[in-house]
Image: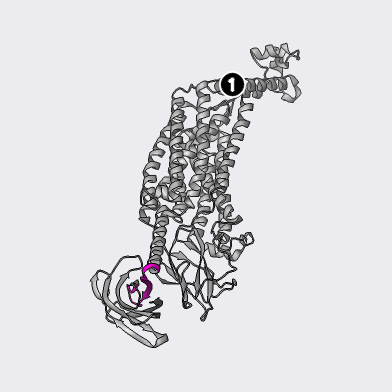
Amino acid sequence: MTLTIAPRVRALVLLLLAAACALLAGAGPASAHAAVTGSDPGQGAVVDKAPARISLTFSEQVAMSDDSLRVLDPEGKRVDTGKPSNVSGTTYAVPLHSGLPDGTYTVAYQVVSADSHPVAGAYTFSIGAPSKTSVSVSGQSADDGVVGWLYGFGRYVSYAGFIVMAGGAAFVLACWRRGSGVRPVQRFVVSGWVALTAATLALLLLRGSFTGSGKVADVFDLSLLGQVLQTKTGAALVSRLLLLAAAALFIAVLFGAYARPSPTTTLTDGASRRQPDPREDAQEKRDLTFGLSIGGVVVASGLAASWAMSEHASVGLQAGIAMPVDVLHLLAVAAWLGGLGALLVALYRAPADTPVDRPAVRRFSQIAFGSVLTLIATGTYQSWRQLGSWSAFTDTRYGQLLLAKIGLVVVMVGVAWISRRWTGRLAETAPVEAVAVREKERVGAGAKPAGDMATTDAGDGDAPATGDSDTDTDTDTDTDTDEHPGSERAAQLARQQAARDAARQKRARDADPNRFGLRRSVLAEAGIAVVLLAVTTVLTQTEPGRTEQEAKAASSSSASASSDTGASGALTLNMPFDTGAEDGKGIVTVDLDPARVGDNEMHVFVERPNGRAFDIPEVKVEFTLKAKDIGPLPVVPDHIATGHWSANGVQIPMAGDWQVDVTVRTSDIDEVTVSKNAQIG
């Protein structure tokens, strides 16, 4: 039965892995985790005069390189000068050449958000009137290309490796200590360590190209690797490698000293029998278990923190709470899914003399139940933090993936309940240790097999063993066994009989319908877990629902403002300012309605970089039409509310390209004047 089941298991596991990879490949490029919430000029805008600079506002602070903001003319040539700079809060700008001709220009950006994920995109604006452009803005994505897919696959392998290594080791220590000496379980845990180490090294090499050019040729660029090591993500990956060295030592002890059986003592008759070693008493075993447990928790927590400190949990709301919650969430996932994988290996591949027993399965069932409760608590908090509203479940890609993940968890818990029922009816199967001990005794003593073995020997027509008489036994006790073929034959037959006994024992164990049912249900759980891990990996690379909704709201506001401008002539100007003093940064917004010749109503709003309104000592506005040498026309608005000033009856004498100057004073001596041109009338 073993020969027929094992290939099926391997085939099913390979099929599930292929399905998981297909899910990853079909998910499409992941969105970034910082979104563009504003731009000047805006997307699709047509301005009369070439701007002096281009500015972009993001939902959070981002990291920029020299080429993060590029402005291209209709022929595809760069017209930006200098390096991008942070003008205020989350607004970044790059200066442009003066005297740019009319036409459609393309703004392309590629930055890295605070949670380590790249942000890329492009949009167009026009000077004078739209024109044809040779620049293509399609396909702009941070995760597009071979490097992006390799990086995503590396993240999947790293998560899987951690879960297998940490969860498998936890299963051995907490549920089935005899499993530390089972080779298939050892290979399972070690394969997790190898996968995590290899994936971490690959991510470290891919990171520079992934957040930059996206070219395969740049993967081994040492200069890019040096830049990566100076980033938060690079430091997290290096820390992970150092912790993996400690994990290797932990695994060596777990499958070395911890799994080593008591030494054997050779007696005067040449037989070997297991004797207790005073140095390995029960207290020493408990101390070693305690030390491995503490060390394993510390190393596993450190590895989990390498993700929490560089991704979603490290930015946004309540980062100080979110990071330890994220660590606890990942540890619970490892204990459940990794332990499930180790249990599956034990059920299918454990030798007949070391079967996984009912107490071990029950202990794992309790740990899995606790892990599920932990996942529910931490997952609820993470969902609230990343979504922010119920509508985000259906209106954002992050929310839709989260619903799929929740559905898979519910199905998996249902299958686990079925496994728990099989566990309660699982029949114990006695190991065949006696057979192995008897075979060792015969080999060591060089004696003929006893009982039915002698009958089998005679029935096969073989010559009787040389120790057949008392005389031979007394005479040849000290003679080398190589000189007596009969003794060698007896040992061979003993080994064959032991193998037959082991096979018979395994068939009897496999014939247990409860054990067979448990195998099937655990295999189903493992299959769901593979897909669940794939969905989780895509989820960690997707823009949080809260951020996506904020970006949509900002775009809607911008579109609404543009619509109002086209219908009634209303004008809105946003101008970042910095007086150079402490707390001197902010954004001043001028609303002019209906922005036409004659009387107008003006509102001025002053906000901090985080969007919160605040008061300043003075705000003044001046209008100048340089083409007709009119102005400046001063307007001193009245203070209405916190961060809000208003003026009625603002006279615009004629239509034209007016320069609007706003003077902002944040203290008795700190003030600055910001300007922007706008078509009025």
Secondary structure at badge 1 equals helix
| Residue 5 higher or lower than 332, as above or below | above
* Residue at 65% in and 19% down: 497
Please say which color scheme the image uses: one colour
Quadrant in the picture for the C terminus:
bottom left
Q: Nearest the camera: 391 or 302?
A: 391
Q: Nearest the camera: 478 or 544?
A: 544
Left or right, 446 with reference to 667: right
Residue to which mark 1 is pinned: 507
Say if residue 261 shows up in the picture: no
| Residue 496 percent location from the top left of the image | 67, 21
- Type of amino acid under label 1: Arg
Quadrant in the picture for the N terminus:
top right
| Residue 509 higher or lower than 378, as above or below | above
| Residue 569 higher or lower than 461, as above or below | below
Say if residue 348 shows up in the picture: yes
Left or right, 469 with reference to 334: right
